[in-house]
Amino acid sequence: MGSLLAARMADGGWAGHVGDQDLPPGALFQEQLHQMKRLGQSLAPAAMLPVLRSQASTVTTLASRTTGSSRTGLLITASRFAEYIGWMAQENGDETTALRATDEAVELAQAGGDTDLADYALVRRALVSYYNGDAPRTIALARQAQRSAAPPRVRGLAAQREAQGHALAGDERACGRALERARDLLAADVDPSAGPVLGTTQLKDPVSMVEGWCFYDLGRPRQAVDVLERQCRRIAPHALNTRVRYGFRHALALAASGEIEQSCETARELLAFMSVVPSATVHTDVRRLGREWSRFRGNPVVRGLRPALANVLGAGC
């Protein structure tokens, strides 16, 4: 048993066994995690992390004092809390903590008999590599996840990440093949799993959204605009973080295709939202947007938004 779980067992926080309930404890905490992910769409990562850590500690400690199927369900749920903590840490700009939380998530999942998260962790690490601009490592990690016996959803998400790595490397053909594979795998994901869903649940068509972003990395911003605009309209109003993330990518594609005023209009509201849902990964795209806009400094619409851009990125932008 891993060190994290062993440490929780020594804490002595929860005593005794879980009593019989109409709904298993793991399912109750899964619903809490679902609600926290909704909160994470409209709250800053720094505000989410203490709450998530406290809840993850509670679930893990309870699992250590429980037996049977209840213990298994709690361990798996605790692993999903840890995985989400990793994402929030990455959004908060703390890559080291993000990777450590991902490792803890794998440890907890394996203690509960779930090996799927170890494969999904490769997808998460590939995302860190992608945002660091490391195309070869992004591709290698994503391929490693696909060679596993993971379920279709995990392999589909890994294929999406591989496509992004190929786009970053400028390999359009390999990118297209990976996207086709991702679409087929995610379409095959029809098993109504009782466990928490891995990956985003805020996109109606995640493969098409990824395809739009790949078009930008491949130097085809006009096609990126067409796809991203269509997909952004399908994002639910409450999913503020997702709207900001892909909205900036749409604005960036517009700027790269020469539609500078439309890019500014698209980004105007999003810049204001960045104070509500700050994101280290989104900042990567905002910095790119600033560089695109800098080619049009004389445009009055661009000049009007430069203060808001500087406020988001800091005085040195």
Image: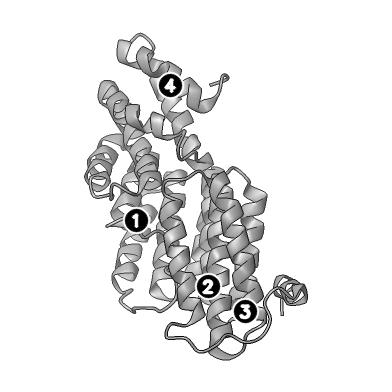
Q: CA distance from mark 4 to mark 3?
A: 47 Å
Decide: is 221 above or below 101. above
Would residue 248 be visible to someone looking at this image? yes
**How was this image coloured?**
one colour
Identify the image quadrant of residue 3: bottom right
Instruction: Of the two numbered discs 4 and 3 on the same chain, state the one appearing first in sequence.
Output: 3
Counting from the top left corner in percent of width and height, residue 103 is at 64, 64
Find out whether the residues at labels 1 and 3 contact each other: C-beta distance under 8 Å. Answer: no
> Badge 2: how crowded within 10 Å, few (<14), some, or many (20+)?
many
Q: CA distance from mark 1 to mark 3?
A: 29 Å
Query: Which residue, given by chain and number where applicable, does mark 4 sit on?
Result: 308
Q: Which residue is mark 1?
A: 202
Label 2, label 1: how far apart the Cα atoms are = 20 Å
Disc 3: which residue: 63
Q: Amino acid at mark 4?
A: Ala
Residue 77 image label? 2
